[in-house]
Amino acid sequence: MPLLPLLPLLLLFLPLSLPAAAAALERPGAIRGAAAARLNRLAEDPLADEDSFARLAEADKRRWAQGAAEEAGLAAKMRRLGEVEVVTRVHVRLVGFDGDGDDNRKLNVKAEEMTKFLNTLKPDNVFRAIHGESHGLAIRQRVAFSVSKAPRRLASAVSGDIFRFVGRAMARAKEGEVVLLPHALVDAHIRNDAAMLTDSAAGSGGGEGGKQPYAVYVLNPRMMPRRYAYSYGSVSDTVCPGTSFQDERYLWVDLTAGPVSYGPVWEGEGAVTAAAYLRAEDYSNDLLHGAFLAHVAALIDSATRHVFVPPLLHVPVTYAVTTDIWLIAMRSGVGDGEAGGGEDMGLSLGAIKDELLSRWPAVVLAGQQVRFKEVVLSLAHCSFCSTALHRAMRSGLFEATTASTGAAPSSAAGMPGGTEVWRHVDSEDLHHYLSEFWPEITDLAGMPNPDYVERNDPNPHAGRFFPVFLFDLHTAEPLLLDGRHRALAYDDMVLAVRTKAPPMLAEYRCEGELVPMDPSNVTRAVLSAILQTAWGVAPTHESWSAIHNVSRHNWRWSVGMTPFGPFSRHTSLSMAHRDAALRNVVLSVLNTTISSTLHLLTAMQKYGSEEAALRPGALRAALLPAVGRAAPQDRPRRRRAVRPRLPSGGVLCAVGAARHGRVVRHRRAVRAGDAHLLRLLPGGACVVVILGQCCRALVPGLHCGAQPPASVAGQAQALLAIS
């Protein structure tokens, strides 16, 4: 697929823009007006089956190909490719910073002051992927902050509702107990204000890219007579209270609420403690005003990086027209294909489908389709399944009496005293053996073998398969992946284990208590794993540190509406999660295209004839398969042969098909994005590959000399290999 029709996807689905592309329209030779409109055919042709470049007038093609004289060289074009920048707009709304709070909280913060501190942040300006050989993408990112102060009536309404609820709850609460407020009490006010901001932005023409910005509300209510935090849903359903909430395109954080401490038991990194909270009363001195603004700016930056612009979990996030997600449930005590799926397995596939596809927007781009299928296998009849599970089983001894203090593995929680055996499943081994037995399991499940489909499908980007392997075991013993997970995501599959064990205690704490976990319900865990595997959505607590060159954890934003982590029971996706799923596909496409094109242009600049390659339409009409001869009646007419100057022992990656050591240009052009293998010189000095739809719309009679790799899905990619 050509690169150009994909660029508008950023503007259509995400609150992003491409300032570098906008600036390019101001350069001499840029395509503007009606010509630019002809290129953007996303609505009519979302998959770029037609080459929109062919719709341009010849004058526009020449002007765009030549450009300004000073920017006509390969070096300038390569530099401009490296300037692609995605801008995310975040609007900060200050609530309760008008200087009319309590004596020790009279903070009067001007929007201009906050803007200054946000603009001084030095965040990483490159999109990152947590897993993979290269963690940096060839696309730059920038967060554009804007700040405004909310009207005083919003601050008064929020403070008044909190004060009245806390006052009523104090009569029932025990001394020192944290008062839990339903988050909807405050969220109703914030949602209304966010809707007015959206309407206002839409009335003024919207922002960059035609999408509304994200919004961060920083709340500074007056001090309350009792410490309070927010519950999410009913109090009984709240795993861990918090001080923030995010939904749709906004997030709010209450500086007065809390503190609430939570995090992993065994790991110190990322745990949220009282010291991590920003308390406005600690900055009542005017001399500390700047320090307060700096800490607020850091808090906003953390929310932005974890919620609104998270890193990709892995690259590439493959684009495919169809994505098939197969739930392969391997059950003990049932026969193959027997009924008893769905809720009986502790997994609601319908809830997962509804969350991914039914709510708007679905986590698929235009023209894509996601299909689900469920297959039940018996472990007694699937020897490969049972072998993989038993080979991955591990066991150890522990003192069960220490479980209540968090000193024992999670599987031990609630067991009587004495030495007990602790069993868990090693996820790496399970993944290895399932990969080894993959062809046999697909035969038993009656599903197509993805390797066979990839080899035989004329369009290698037509579809992809993701199996979800669920081991549904009829045992009351807790059995977790690596001793702590109900489901885990790999690049090629999802692993899950479900048992009939009662709720147990996990290896995470909230307010000094171990967090409960239900091994018999894996719906939420599988949903989050599918998001990670299929769309590369990183968990809310993970981010990438370019300074440390490693992923870092911060559990601050893992409460409330998030399908990730042990501190929430929500299975709903916020708009930020859906945006991340859509954005990751587009970023992966752009990254692959830009990186490979730069690779090709670098080799052309180093080994080839730059002048010949940059003729108007040269590269476009050039890449034809050299292996194979046209039938006499179909052989294209030749123009005067181009005899380029070749470097010593070198390579010319240029125009046309090679015949007898010469480069011949053909009258008929080839679709941009078609895939061809081209050897220019006898003996093979250079191979140019453009990945896309192989051998479509070629000069009649010519055929591909070899099948191109199918690792990049649905996109145009340029790759040069020097032999």
Image (cartoon, rainbow, N blue to C red):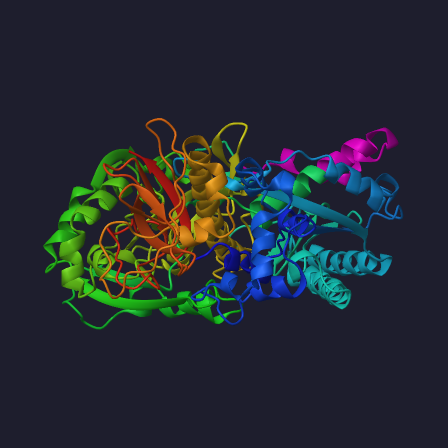
Q: Is residue 696 visible?
A: yes
Q: Which residues are magenta?
A: 270-296
Q: Which of the pair 318/146 is nearer the observer? A: 318
Q: Residue at x 41, y 49 (%)?
A: 717
Could you tell me residue 526's position as x and y percent?
Answer: 37, 56
Question: On screen, 360 above or below 682?
Answer: below
Q: 334 left or right of 479? A: left
Question: On screen, 513 above or below 235?
Answer: above
Q: Which of the pair 122/18 is nearer the observer? A: 18
Q: Residue at x 80, y 59 (%)?
A: 154
Q: Is residue 224 visible?
A: no
Q: 62 left or right of 719? A: right
Q: Is residue 474 magenta?
A: no
Could you tell me residue 357's position as x and y percent?
Answer: 45, 68
Which residue in the rendered view is the most extreme toward the front? Answer: 640
**Quadrant position of residue 333:** bottom left
**Quadrant position of residue 14:** bottom right
Q: Which of the pair 134/445 is nearer the observer? A: 134
Marker count (numbered) = 0
Q: Quadrant of the C terminus?
A: top left
Q: 677 left or right of 39? A: left
Q: 296 left or right of 1? A: right
Q: Which of the pair 366/418 is nearer the observer? A: 366
Q: Residue at x 74, y 38 (%)?
A: 119
Q: Quadrant of the N terminus?
A: bottom left
Q: Residue at x 73, y 66 (%)?
A: 202
Q: Is residue 283 magenta?
A: yes
Could you tell me residue 84's position as x and y percent?
Answer: 58, 45
Could you tell me residue 143's position as x and y percent?
Answer: 66, 45
Q: Identify the main secondary structure in magenta.
A: helix
